[in-house]
Image: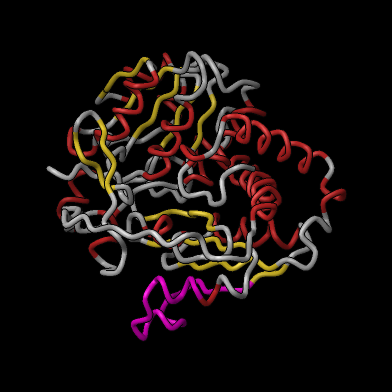
Amino acid sequence: MQARNLIDLEDVSKEDLDEIIRLAGMIKANPSIFTDACHGKIMATLFYEPSTRTQMSFQTAMLRLGGQIIGFDNPSNASVSKGESLKDTIRVVSGYADVIVMRNPVEGSALAASLYSKSPIINAGDGGHLHPTQTLTDLVTLSYEKGTLEGLTIGLCGDMKNGRTVHSLIKTLSKYKGNRFIMISTPQLQMPEYVIEVLKESGCDYSFSDSLEKSIADLDVLYMTRIQQERFASREEYEAQKGVYVLDEQKMKLAKPDLVVFHPLPRVDEITVGVDDDPRAKYFEQAEYGMYARMALIIMMLTNRKGTLPPAVQSSDTRCCKNPRCVTNTEAYVPHLFYEHGGKAVCKFCDSLLDE
């Protein structure tokens, strides 16, 4: 695998993505062959936010590969609670572990961590920004449940604004030919502009909808998402969006016989339990595929451990990202880095436009 870290799947070549999918399939078919693949290796899981599937699947993946695990799942039980910076935590832990898996509520935190780590960093979710390993899970599941990653009409429903899973998924599936995207949400929760720009540049067909009922008949894949209470500024804002889109048995009657329904989980009320027994519902299988996807990723990432710090990154740029959730506004030492897109400056850490 060419990339040293997995921060954003944009950094991973299509060839490496295809190799991860292929390797995940081999592991699923013949798990006993890989039981010592990571013998003597240590993975650190640093979870600054709650997680069930992502954390447990990473831990299970490493254990099934013969490796060991260190880390924390509650920052109040670590030196973070004493005010330790992200940089210091990463510098220390990367001296202990061969690979670091991190979830953090601050956008851009995984990229920031990679600047100070001797070991590969895997982004397990950075706030509402990106969730690349969930996308790997989705790609592996799609590949084996639909038999292709191309020529699909994909509906994404719910929280497009804060849904890091759908941001990563669109950015990656836009690399594959003939995919069409229908984004189903309220006006308040529409897809961020930087993701739309990816679709424009890729030439993918895309459209917006405010109705699941009107869109579902056209779909090959339906990706439901949770309205995330933790991403809203107030309870009132959350209550106004909660329950707008609910997939139930009646709506499933409108769908294609070979539709597949995905959900990154956990769900709240956006899919009724009656849908669980429909053979088109694949979200529990999706969670299992995630373990195999992460096993393949760990094997490939461990080939990249250099055991040395990356070259120092400095910046004299005096401009500041205006996103209050960006790591550059929570960790003062992080360099302010921007890239140009369409003649506009964009924060390299959180992908927010500078002039927003």
**Position of 337 compared to 56: left or right?**
left
Magenta-tinted stretch = 70-91
| Residue 248 visible somewhere in the drawing | yes
| Residue 255 visible somewhere in the drawing | no
Relative to 40, does residue 217 appear above or below in the rendering?
above
Q: Quadrant of residue 341?
A: top left
Q: Position of residue 241 (x, y in %)?
A: 22, 43
User: In the rendered structure, does residue 258 fall within the stretch colored magenta?
Assistant: no
Give the position of the N terminus as an image quadrant: top right
Nearer to me, 214 or 208: 208
Give the position of the C terminus as an image quadrant: top left
Nearer to me, 56 or 92: 92
Q: How many marks?
A: 0
Going 33% across and 51% down the picture, which residue do you hit? 349
Going 44% across and 23% down the picture, which residue do you hit? 154
Q: Position of residue 93 (x, y in %)?
A: 55, 74
Q: Please say which color scheme the image uses.
A: secondary structure
Relative to 197, does residue 50 appear above or below in the rendering?
below
State the residue lying farthest toward the left.
355
